[in-house]
Structures are given as C-alpha cells and as structure tokens.
Amino acid sequence: MKLYEKGAYLLGGTELIAEGPDAEAQIKQKTGKDVSKETAAKNTIAYGILENHNTSGNMEHLQIKFDKLTSHDITYVGIIQTARASGLEKFPIPYVLTNCHNSLCAVGGTINEDDHMFGLTCAKKYGGIYVPPHQAVIHQFAREMLAGGGKMILGSDSHTRYGALGTMAMGEGGPELVKQLLSKTYDIAMPGVVGVYMTGKPSKGVGPQDIALAIIGEVFDKGYVKNKVMEFVGPGVDNLSVDYRIGVDVMTTETTCLSSIWKTDDKVREFYEIHGRTEDFAQLQPGDVTYYDGLIEIDLSEIKPMIAMPFHPSNTYTIEELNANLMDILDDCEKRAKVSLDGQVDFTLKDKVRNGRLYVDQGIIAGCAGGGFENITDAADILRGASIGPDEFTLSVYPASTPIYMELVKNGCVADLMETGAIVKTAFCGPCFGAGDTPSNNGFSIRHSTRNFPNREGSKLQSGQISSVALMDARSIAATAANKGYLTSAADVDVNFTKPKYFFDKTIYENRVFDSKGVADPNEEIKFGPNIKDWPAMSALPENLVLKVVSEIHDPVTTTDELIPSGETSSYRSNPLGLAEFTLSRKDPEYVGRAKEIQKAQKALEAGECAGEAVPELKEIMQTVKKDYPNVNHSNFGVGSTIFAVKPGDGSAREQAASCQKVLGGWANIANEYATKRYRSNLINWGMLPFLIPEGDLPFTNGDYIFVPEVRKAVEDKLDDIKAFVVKDGQMTPFTMKLGELTDDERDIILKGCLINYYRG
C-alpha cells in the first residue's frame, strides 16, 4: 500500500500521475489536452454529487440538502424531540426510524419498547418510515431500500456509509438531522477528496474486513483522510462483489473520513435489480482526467488476513505476523492498555496462549460490517461439517436483515452453522456497542464488527471488569471456530467457496414495515413513555464566562464511548438528565459530581441569586477577577464546567457525548485537536465552545478556574484568538485559546445557547 505525499491525477480511470512540476505536461502529452488541477478536481465523483446537492451557489462553502435521513432507536427520540421543540410539523424528506440497538428490551423495564412506540407514532404523525425491532440493522435496510446512485443520505450513526452503491452518505450527530427536518442545510467547507486506487484481486480467504483493516492501519495515525471523502476507483474495484465492496466501505468511518463514494458498474446495477430498484442505479465514474488531493494505492492481491488487536481498529497486524511474534505483540497490547485503561485494571492476553497458540473465548459475525450475505455464506462454507467444540469458545452469527436471514434459511447455511454449535440470531447491533454477547471477565472476543474500543464489548472498568475485542474478517473467525477457538487465518484453510446466488424477498418488509409514503397524519397522538423527557432549558452564552475544569484526559484519543458509554446506558438516551448521570462514568467517575457542583452557581444566577452563595469557592475567584475586570457582575457573567482532552470525539456520531455535558452545565471543551468533524459539530449544536490550545504544557490543571472575558463579543466579532486567564491563588495568569473556523449559523447557535434556542428565535 502506498500513500502519495501530495495529490495525484487519474487518467482514463487506469493511469496515475503524481502531482509535481511536470504533471500537467505529462497529461497533455498523453491526452493532448491542457487540464488544470482546479478543473481536474471537479471531475471526481464526489464533486459531482456534492455540486448537485449544494444550495449555496458556492462550491467552496457548501450548504447541502440530503435526499433521505435515517436513525435508530438510541438516536431518533432525541432528534424528534429536538425538532418538535424547534417547530417540526412534518418530515420534509423520507426519514427512516429503525430499531436495531435497543431491540432486546432488556434494560429499564418498559423504556426500550416505549421508545419504539414513540417512533411508530411519530412516523405516522410526521410521515416517516418505521422498521420494527429485529427486521434489519439500520445500514442494511438503507442499502436494501434507500440507497440510490448519485444520492445523499444523512444518518445519526457514524457508520452511515453507502458509497459502494453510489450513494454519498454521512454519519452525524442528531442536531444535523434536526436541521434537515426543519428544511435547513448541512454547512461545510468543500472537503478534500482522496482517491483509493485499487488493483489486483484479493487472495482466497481474504475478506473485506481484511482490506478495510489494512487501510485503517495505514492511514489513521497519519490523519491522511481525516474529514475528507474517500473515492474508490481503479481496475481492482471490478474484481470485488458488491457485498465485498460494502464490507470495505462501511469501515471507512474508522479512518475518520467524512464520507465515501465508489465508482459503479454492472455489478452494482445487478444489486439494484436483485432488490427490485433498477431505477435507482446510476453509472458513476471519475472524469477522463481527475485530480485527487491525496491517493492511496493498494494492490488487493498483497493483502493478507488481518487482525486489529485491542483497543482500536488501527492497531493492526497480519494474523501471520501475530502468530509469528505472539508474545512481543501481546506485550505491546499490555503497554497500550495501560494508556487506554488508565491502569484501572490489570490487562493481559498472555494467559490466552496455550501450547504457543492464541486461544479465543468468543467469535461474533454481526451487524452492518459482518452480517452480510456473502460474509455468512463464506463462513458457513469454512465451518460446514466442523464443530466449534464444547469448551469456552462460542460463536454467534447475526444476519444484518430478515431478508438475508430468510435466504440463509432457504439455502441451508443456517442449518450448516447451527450444526457446528454456532448460534444464529436476529438482526441486532448489540455486539458492536456492548449490549449483547458481552464476554466473561478477562474474556477475549474476535469480531467481524466495526469497533474494538475499551469496554465497547460491555465490560465495566468501574466494576473491576475487563474483556477485550479484536477485529477480524468473518472468514478467519470461521477458520478459528473450526479450530475450536485457536486463532487461525482463513488463508490456512482448504475450502471451496460455493458463492450461492442471493435472492432478495421484500415480503417481510411489506408485511411489517410501516411506510407512510410521505403522508403525515397530524391527528396521530404520540405515545410518550415515562422515560421520554424534554430537553431542559438552556441559557444563552453570557457576556463573560467562568469555567471550572472538571476533568482532564491525556489519552492520545478519547472516544465518544468514553465520553458517554454505550451498552445498557443506551436505554436512557430518551431521558437527557437520566443519561447524563453516566457521563464519563468509565473514564472519570468523579466527573458528574464535579460538574453538578459547579452547575449550582449557574442555576443560582438564573434564579437571580448569588453564585458565590451556591458555590462558596467562587467568592475568592470573583474577587480576583474583579481586580482587573471591575464591571463583571451577576448580570453579565455565567458559570459552567469544561473538560480538557487531547483529542476527543473519535468513533460514534452520538450527540449525547456533547449534550450530556451540556445538561450538566458544560459550556466548553478544550482540546489540542478534535478527532472528528461530527463531535465538534455536536459541541457547537449544543451551544458549547470548541476551544483549541497548542500541544505542550497545559496552563491549567483539573479543578482550576478559567475566566474568559467578553467571550460573547469575541464570538460575535468572529475572533479566532480568545483571551483567557487561569484564576488561582489570587492571581490571573493569561493564556490564549482558539475557536477555529465557524460558520455564521454556528456562531449564532453558540450565542443562543443551543440549536433548540436558535430555531425558537
């Protein structure tokens, strides 16, 4: 795999020329045409789709309107509640509410099914589509029923990726979907486009997860595609089935790219024909001369079966390399764990080594990444006639939709899998975020799913528990299962892949999915369970701001799972205050108490009372502030909390990573860098200031107070450099923070305190 240092030109879809002083001369020699870089950059597939959806008239500053929206049952309640509070009357475009996260209804009594009834009645009232639990995971339903060539879909799940079908899809926090529901736009600067030029054909036993992990391992740490669009081109794409392309595409989220798009061909046309939607196919190809801002060149034939060891999808090795250097790599995992787990528990995988081989406790093939038809049929071919054994090792398989499940039943693959001792379950995302198949303490799971962050599999550090996940392809998971839990590469298995044809039967959807066909019924009464709560009132940004640092995180990257844990906490996402009690619970259990304590001061100010009486330590802080800023008084300052993290926001699109801080009185985050655009957008949409400071010595520490004078004016005046002071021991020590680029609308949202206030006027 090769990453180009600069950009590159693609000629005729098959020839690459690296950007350089003589590149345009080479192009003219080969094509007879004078083509500038600026013109060639408009020939990407991505540019054409973005241009067709941009309403601003300016391709440097995009205002996008999407064709369709999709959410699942731990995001749609908050989204619709926010939109209702902002004036929602009808869904203006198709909006699909799927139920694949809280579908077990296993936590909190009735609250999961209450959310589902809320979703169904909202689909009726506002004119949406409702997919009942166990029918399909969000992204498989979108592939089967929503995607279309040249279209754009916005989803409130980070793995909203349908590029292999010619659809540019993006995963964002809920407030961005609220904007679309209110007929507003998604505003971004024109993203860079990075070409992924594929040649060759995958070796036998190499699956889509292997290709994806190889790419992630190469680009993540370098930030090579961060907030850019990945565009898959080259002759190697022709050698991949559509199911295979989908399996690579869904994992592009783990590179931190903004979106993805692939060239399309007759195989994609056949996919739409199989699903009865031929009219949704569009032929998409880059232009004769296309410029990419960066380029990843990958020979598919060189990729070997891969594994991403705990605790990140970028911690990649070939399985061959792992087996050859087992103890050294496991030692490196222990060192990484000390950082990821803050030394809260002892972690090792060395006790999994038996007779020189790594033993695995659990295998999972599931969700939007692993639950595809081809992944499961290939796994069944490897396992046919084998036994997974009567020891610790277990294997669970989750087809991604009921139509896939039905076809696997009809062609006998379900029987083949179950005969081995594997369990075949319904469509459910639980194993991907810690709500199903949690391993035992110290257990080690291999999964064809999307992420392996700390505790994402469901263990709880605060309870002294630890288990871990490595990501692998379904084929190598099946090979491991056939060897009764001993880690095995699919390349080492003698198997004949039968590649049965897929037949899509949408009867189950016709029988069970509620589709309003876009017709709203304003007389429908929404069903509210007792856990579904409105958002609390939120204040506008004050003239001056006093922040208390209530958590300090120095991990290289902080995931949204660490900011607001998944798993059983997901059941409380319809209850903003209830969910907020879990904020940072696995990373910094003291955070909630500290945030609520300083929030007392803001609540006192809002009630016309003295902040210093509510939080006595503020009296000394304000006395120090008034020495230099005598005009600061109870009518023109606000008090709240902030956290510092080196690089927060990797992973899920969940808006609750920001909103939970906000409802606990958070006014800001301070970071060296934000891991994703979507987390920074979530902060902004909840009225929180996304401050940046340079790497190096921190000017403050946990528990310190920061005074930010005239912060409201700074936002209004579009200042980037924000003056601030650490207030400590009677002294004011100055330092500077930056806000980074903000659109005018984003500034207004921050000034008004949150997106809800912004739309209320």
Image (cartoon, rainbow, N blue to C red):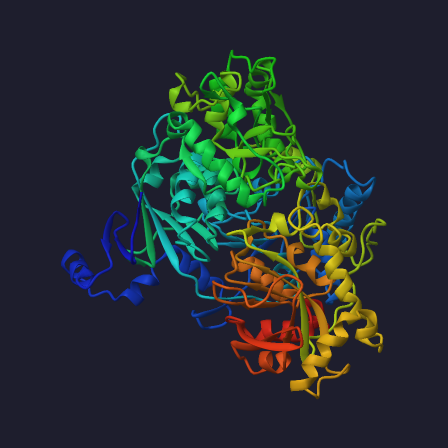
**Percent position of residue 542, x then y:** 70, 78
**In this orientation, does residue 298 appear?**
yes
In the rendered image of this protein, does residue 505 appear above or below residue 181? above
Q: Is residue 478 left or right of residue 37?
A: right
In terms of image quadrants, where is residue 34? bottom left
In the rendered image of this protein, does residue 343 appear above or below residue 294? above
Q: Is residue 481 left or right of residue 712?
A: left
Q: Residue at x 28, y 56 (%)?
A: 8
Q: Residue at x 57, y 13 (%)?
A: 389
In the rendered image of this protein, does residue 669 appear above or below residue 282? below
Q: Which image quadrant: the N terminus? A: top left
Q: Residue furthest bottom?
A: 631
The residue lying toward the viewer, choosing from 449 and 82, is 449
Q: Is residue 320 left or right of residue 381?
A: left
Q: Residue furthest front?
A: 729
**Percent position of residue 466, x then y:** 63, 35
In the rendered image of this protein, does residue 472 appear above or below residue 339? above
Q: Which image quadrant: the C terminus? A: bottom right
**Percent position of residue 104, x then y:** 73, 35
**In this orientation, does residue 262 appear?**
no
**Percent position of residue 639, x then y:** 72, 72
The residue lying toward the viewer, choosing from 651 and 23, is 651
